[in-house]
Image (cartoon, coloured by chain):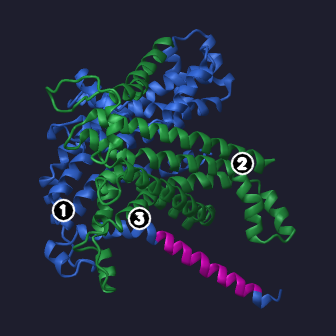
Amino acid sequence: MSPSSSTQLRNWRRVWRLTTAILIALLFLVPIVYVVMISIESPNQFLDHPLVPPVPPSLQNFSSAYQQGDLGPQLVNTIIYSVSAAAISTGLSLLIAYPIARKLIRFSSWVYAWFVIGICLPLPIIPLFIESRDLHLYDNRIGYILLHVEPGLPLGVILLTAFILGIPKELDEAAWIDGAPYLRYLRSVVVPLAWPSIVIIFLYSLLAVWNDIIGPVVLLASPNLFPVARGVYTFYSSNQSAYTLLAAAVMIVSLPVALLFVVSQRQLLRATMGLR
Amino acid sequence: MWSGIAVGMAFYVLFGIAPAAANILVSFTNYSGLPGSPTSFAGLSNYSALLTTEGPGFVSSLTETVVFVVGVTVVQNVVAMVLAHRLQGDGRAAAVLRVLAFFPIVLGVTVVGIVWLLLFDPLSSPAQAVFGAFGVHSAFFGSNATAMPLVIIVQVWQNLGFTMVVFIGSLKTMPPSIYEAASLDGVTPWRRFRSITWPMMAPAVTVNVLFAVIGSLTTYNLIYILTDGQFGTNTLGMLAFNSAFGSTEDLGLGAAVTVVLLVVAVCIAVPLAMVLRYRERRLLT
């Protein structure tokens, strides 16, 4: 191969890499950029030329959407629901995963298998709805939180078991023999060792509760208990042609998870790569 | 220790296993969501109602489910495989694009759904502008011809990042020495993919294909936001939900559809898992 054809090949490769990178960026950016752009357009501007960036930008949509959509109280609801359900779910996952991983109980592989089955089962929403009414968990905060603990358990138990198996036994068993009370031992020895994986499981359960739409539609009836997922959907249904207002509402609702993602993306992606 | 396990298992049994099993019981009753209506044993009537023409459109729902599951599984895995090869590198641009591709999962179905409804609004949207320029006018999510392809695209768009990252994780475990040996032998890129990369990615393919099949079979939350099962997008999961919580509030009928869905899921997922496992073993030895 002559030197000139090899540089030509290298140039072609560079063009190819740049083109594909731009195409991939467009695939994921166009929807987001469009929403960001129209959220700062006034309704009149949107009617005249929606696809031109607005000068000057207007923040009117954000305050209108926040008030009309009642998004503030709904964000508070969502934070209460997702943080408490994810915290309980992650804690229970650890309480189950540690004895399984260290084979402290009999039939531990059998218990584990039940959680593998659970990961494939869809949410049995119809019996859950009946159950929630019979157990007085329907349409109240505590009930909503308790009903959202279970969906995080299968993945939590499976991932935490895998992570704990990766921790050398010697590190935690030495402390166990000292005869510390089990819970204190878990908190002071196991939790620090497994902390990165605990954070990942907490994040995944938190996102699942935060983004759940079927749960709030079926298990809640009072608007003052709605989380943002249902609130913003209701807002959409009643304002379908108020495009700029909807875009602002969508952005307000996404901002907290977007920030959380920016902070945690490295760990989240690395943990997901481990799934093979 | 035992009390910790007991509390955890209590949650799992009470809100996971028991309701899943109770589905079968509910499917044999005329349980209604409307308060005050008596519940009685209804035998197989919910199941026979599925097969009659006055029923909730079960047969068309079956075909729509097949289209959705096959469409999502194929498109999602092929595109994610291409993206994984392009974005597996250590460069800064690749890292940024990986994060970008993962972002829709974080946003959640409601936000993603509304964003795409805005993008494809039939009255005023970028899609309307682009297609309108060619003189094509469509209702997009409100049209029998285009709703299903669009729903598949959005479902894939949302989950692409996850599938891709699992593939990248698998690519990262390959020993570079194999590729060095192959490049010394002058192997073409395609042959390198066919004979080295593809077989070694078999376990990741198993995970991703199973996730895509089970996920697209059982989840309907995105369809609920985009079309609510109208315009030819009434998959079995959507049908079960709307039978139970739509205007009829027929929980028994919804449970019957769910049982059928579970049977279908097991009948597809178990043989598929076995075939994929067999393929892994054959490719890796």
In terms of image quadrants, where is residue A65? bottom left
At x 31%, y 69%, the residue is B140
Residue A6, given in percent of the width and then of the height, sits at 76, 85
Numbered disc 3: secondary structure: helix
In this rendering, the label closer to the viewer, 1 or 3: 3
Q: Nearer the viewer, residue A60 or B125?
A: B125
Q: Name the colour assigned to chain B in the rendering.
A: green
Q: Which residues are magenta?
A: A6-25
**Tag 2, which chain?**
B
- Cβ atoms at labels 1 and 3 below 8 Å apart: no
Q: Which chain is blue?
A: A
Residue type (three-letter) at the residue carrying disc 2: Arg
Dot 3 corresponds to which residue?
Answer: B149
Dot 1 corresponds to which residue?
Answer: A240
Q: Nearer the viewer, residue A131 or B107?
A: A131
- Cβ atoms at labels 1 and 2 below 8 Å apart: no
At x 17%, y 66%, the residue is A241
**Tag 3, which chain?**
B
Q: Is A7 part of what is drawn in magenta? A: yes
Dot 2 corresponds to which residue?
Answer: B279
